[in-house]
Image: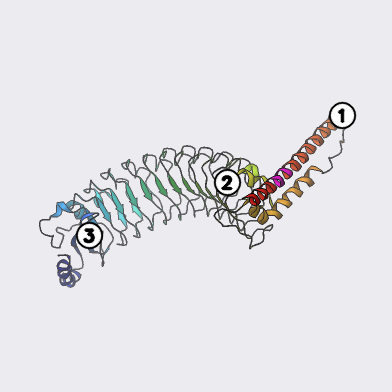
Amino acid sequence: MKSINFLSFLIFLPLSLSQNETIYCIYSNDEINGYTCELVLINPDGRDDFTRINGEHLENHSNRDVKRIMRGDYSDSTNFPSILCEKFFNTIRIDGYSIGIRKIDINSFGNCKDLEFLSLYDNEINEITEDAFTHNTKLNFLILVENKLNGLPANVFVPLTKLRTLYLQNNNLGYVSSSLFHSLVNLELLHLYDNNLRDLPGDTFVTLTKLQNLAISHNNLSQINPQWFNTLTSLEVLYLNSNNFREIPKNAFKNLQSLWILYLHENKLEDLPADIFTPLKNLVYLYINNNNLKVIHSDSFGQLPSLQSLQFYRNQVDQIDERFIDITGIKEIDGSFNPCIDRNEVIRDESPSRNEIRAALQRCFDNYRERQITTTTEEPQECKVDGLDERVCQLEREVESLKNENKEMRSKIDDLNARLKILEEKILSIKF
């Protein structure tokens, strides 16, 4: 039956083109999406006064049976004519990609009150009115990827309390209102990457307690606001890569206990604060490659028992605290193209031994140890004061000297413990 419909469409097409505007449906039954209108929409001037939809229904079917409107070939329109939702009012899915739509308002989808899935990928949309989704309260999946959005009305998403997935990437958003996403209390995925964002208000994501996947990568953000993630206790995947971050504020990730993938690569990070990753008990994959890091301290990671993969290639790393290897469950390291690592010493086996990891990073460990010893043996500055102040200064120097001796002793103990573990592994490998 579909072939007959398509044949009639081919006969109809020359006539419709001569009339300049038309709406035509090729009907079919889709096992997954139900009764479908494959839409041919020729409306380059954006008319919204259509009175009929051309095309022949399948036997025993009518407008009320249409569940999906899917873009067909030859479509070209600057709007989504209101007649489509007026006639196909039971539609639950619209795939309106690559049509040329420029504007969305309340008339576009207002009569599709059961709509659950709306894809407007790769159009020319530069305006969405504040009331555009007023009647689409059942929507749970919205795709607005690759359009020309510069901004969005603060209340445009207020009706969409059931929305679970929102794709806004590949637009030109420079700023979003602090309340833009506040009504999306059931949102699980939000992608804002490849825009032109320079800043985000601290409470942008405050109500998104069910959010599992957040992408704000490939923007022009220069500072991480520690308030962004305070309430995101369900977050599992976080994309912060490809921005201009130079530092990570202390406690920025303190409430992200569910996080298991963190992307921080392609920024300008120069240092990692102590305990910055410590709260991330479920972190498995960490990407900090392509930054300006020089030293990897063990106290930046704390106890990360779940961490299996660390990518820190193409930094300026010349020192690594050897204790880092012992406090994580690391199984895969790529540290190529760093000063203290030969470019071929890349570990990517599923379960490399600790010896293999240490062999690849040994020069980094040695540099770190030497630097610590050099720091602890530096001569204290002379006291250039008289009387009681001089005595206080001398006592402070003695205390500092004792601290340094203690640090040096701890460093030696740590080194001995590390060597002892290597020997234990060798003994076990010989036995078994």
Q: Residue furthest left?
A: 60
Query: Is residue 402 among the parts visible in the rendering?
Result: yes
Q: Is residue 175 above or below residue 70?
A: above
At x 53% / y 53%, what residue is drawn?
243
Count up the numbered dots: 3
Circle 2 packing at 10 Å, graded few (<14), some (14-19), many (20+), is some
Q: Which residues are magenta?
A: 416-420
At x 20% / y 55%, what residue is drawn?
84
Q: Quadrant of residue 120?
A: bottom left
Query: Is residue 318 among the parts visible in the rendering?
Result: no
Q: Residue furthest front?
A: 431
Circle 3 packing at 10 Å, graded few (<14), some (14-19), many (20+), is some
As measured in the structure, the alpha-carbon distance from the residue carrying label 1 to the one carrying label 3 is 90 Å
Q: SS class of the residue under badge 2? A: loop
Q: Quadrant of residue 195?
A: bottom left
Q: Which mark is residue 329?
A: 2
Q: Quadrant of residue 205?
A: top left
Q: Which mark is residue 310?
A: none
Query: Disc 2 residue type?
Result: Gly
Q: Position of residue 9 (x, y in %)?
A: 17, 68
Mark 1 and mark 2 residues within 8 Å of each other at the beta carbon: no
Q: Residue furthest top?
A: 388
Q: Which residue is mark 3?
A: 47
Mark 1 and mark 3 residues within 8 Å of each other at the beta carbon: no
Q: Position of residue 102 (x, y in %)?
A: 32, 58
As measured in the structure, the alpha-carbon distance from the residue carrying label 2 to the one carrying label 3 is 62 Å
Q: Which residue is mark 1?
A: 391
Query: Disc 3 residue type?
Result: Arg
As measured in the structure, the alpha-carbon distance from the residue carrying label 1 to the one carrying label 2 is 49 Å
Q: Position of residue 382 (x, y in %)?
A: 87, 38
Q: Quadrant of the N terminus?
A: bottom left
